[in-house]
Amino acid sequence: MIAPLPPVAPNLSAPDGETPAPRGSFRRHNRLQHKLDFDTVFQRGRRAQGRHFNLIACLVRDPDAQPRLGLAVAKGAGHSPARARLRRLTREAFRAIRPALQRPVDLVVSARQPWPNAQLADVVEELLFLSKKLRLIA
């Protein structure tokens, strides 16, 4: 007999506590890992500034590449647990908007100020706004 699947962990940012977390992965090929990758995005990328984030996007020439995310969260964005929470929310938001990105692109999200009341929906909304501003999403 096949055992039932375990329940999905609740999304801590959901107000009801019962909404399942989005499934997805954030593996090595989905993130910027090396200083050279970050430097390339910072030098060649286009920038958009939002209320809480700065988004820098650099188009990738390889048509088979996947969108990648790099995070730069400054100490001015709060104490260590607050910065870690902001990074987790940003990764989840990237997973949510990744299918909507029309071209392979390297993104760097830079958070410079505290955002203590951030919820996943707020972060997704801000990333969508900035992506549309840079014409990454139609």
Image (cartoon, rainbow, N blue to C red):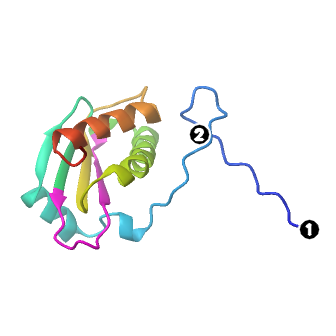
Type of amino acid at the residue the image marks with label 1? Met
Q: Are marks 2 and 1 in contact (CB under 8 Å)?
A: no
- Looking at the picture, does residue 64 appear above or below residue 52? below
Numbered range of the magenta stretch: 58-75
- Looking at the picture, does residue 92 appear above or below residue 31? above
Residue drawn at x 55%, y 53% as measured from the top left? 23
- Looking at the picture, does residue 84 appear above or below residue 37? above
Q: Which residue is mark 2?
A: 11
* Residue farthest toward the left in the current orientation of the protein: 43
Tag shown at residue 1: 1
Percent of width and height locating residue 50: 21, 33
Crowd band around label 1 with a 10 angstrom C-alpha radius: few (<14), some (14–19), many (20+): few
Describe the element under mark 2 as helix, strand or loop.
loop
Tag shown at residue 56: none
Describe the element under mark 1 as helix, strand or loop.
loop
Type of amino acid at the residue the image marks with label 2? Asn
Q: Nearer the viewer, residue 123 or 36?
A: 123
Residue drawn at x 45%, y 47% as measured from the top left? 92
Is 70 contained in the magenta span?
A: yes
Specify whether 108 is left or right of 45: right
Residue drawn at x 18%, y 66% as measured from the top left? 60
* Residue farthest toward the front in the current orientation of the protein: 138
